C-alpha cells in the first residue's frame, strides 16, 4: 500500500526544501568569503546530499543498485550536475548569491528552447512572451543599460557567465 502525504505536509516539505536550497548558496557565499574553495564546497555539498539520500533509501528499503540500462544516463546526469554545481558555486563566489541564482534560473528557459529546437514540443507564444518578460526583468537586475553595460559587465560578467554555464548544464539534465 502506498502511503501518501497530505497536501499540507507536502507544502511544508516543499517550503523546507526551498529554504534549505536557498540557505545552501548563502552559506556557500559566507564560506567563500572566509577562504573556502569552490571545489571543497561542491564536494561537501555532494557528500552531504549523498549521505541524506543514502539514509532515506535505507530507511525506505530501496535498493542502491541501478538497472544496467540506467547506468550510462545516470553517469551523464551526474557529470552534468557536478558541472552545474561547480559553475553555480563559482558564480556565488564572485557575485551575490541571489543574482547568481536569478541567472541560473534561465535553465528552465534553455530547456524549453532545447525542446522546441529538437521538435519535442511546439513553440507557444505564451511561453515566448513569458521568457521575454523574465529576461527583461533579469536585464533590469543586471543593470544592463547602454551607458552602464561596460561597468556592470566588468563588475558582474565573470559571475554571470559562471551562473549561465550552470544553467546550460542543468538544462541538459532536465
Image (cartoon, rainbow, N blue to C red):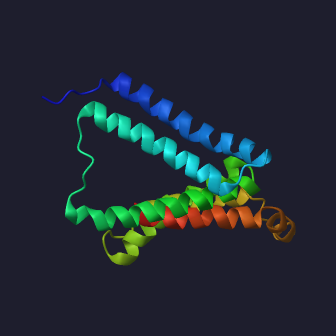
Q: Taking 143 as reference, is 18 left or right?
A: left
The vertical placement of 27 against 106, above or below, is above
Q: Position of residue 106 (x, y in %)?
A: 55, 60
Farthest left residue in view:
1
Q: Position of residue 42 (x, y in %)?
A: 58, 52
The vertical placement of 174 against 54, above or below, is below
Q: Taking 68 as reference, is 115 left or right?
A: right
Q: Position of residue 45 (x, y in %)?
A: 55, 46
Point 42% across, 71% down: residue: 114
Q: Quadrant of the C terminus?
A: bottom left
Q: Position of residue 69 (x, y in %)?
A: 21, 65
Residue 105 in sight here: yes
Q: Taking 117 as reference, is 6 left or right?
A: left
The vertical placement of 84 against 53, above or below, is below
How many numbered marks are there? 0
Q: Nearer the viewer, residue 16 or 65?
A: 65
Point 45% across, 64% down: residue: 79
Q: Nearer the viewer, residue 87 or 122?
A: 87
Q: Quadrant of the N terminus?
A: top left
Point 74% across, 66% down: residue: 158
Q: Quadrant of residue 59?
A: top left
The vertical placement of 170 against 43, above or below, is below
Amino acid at each position: 500500500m502506498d502511503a501518501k502525504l497530505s497536501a499540507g505536509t507536502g507544502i511544508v516539505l516543499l517550503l523546507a526544501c526551498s529554504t534549505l536550497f536557498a540557505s545552501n548558496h548563502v552559506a556557500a557565499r559566507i564560506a567563500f568569503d572566509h577562504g573556502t574553495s569552490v571545489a571543497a564546497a561542491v564536494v561537501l555539498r555532494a557528500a552531504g546530499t549523498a549521505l541524506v539520500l543514502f539514509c532515506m533509501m535505507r530507511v525506505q528499503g530501496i535498493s542502491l543498485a541501478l538497472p544496467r540500462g540506467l547506468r550510462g544516463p545516470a553517469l551523464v546526469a551526474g557529470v552534468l550536475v557536478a558541472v552545474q554545481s561547480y559553475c553555480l558555486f563559482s558564480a556565488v563566489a564572485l557575485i551575490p548569491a541571489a543574482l547568481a541564482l536569478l541567472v541560473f534560473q534561465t535553465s528552465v528557459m534553455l530547456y524549453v528552447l532545447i525542446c522546441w529546437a529538437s521538435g519535442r514540443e511546439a513553440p507557444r507564444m505564451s511561453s515566448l512572451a513569458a521568457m521575454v518578460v523574465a529576461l527583461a526583468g533579469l536585464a533590469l537586475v543586471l543593470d544592463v543599460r547602454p551607458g552602464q553595460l561596460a561597468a556592470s559587465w566588468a563588475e558582474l560578467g565573470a559571475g554571470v557567465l559562471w551562473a549561465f554555464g550552470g544553467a546550460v548544464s542543468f538544462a541538459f539534465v532536465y
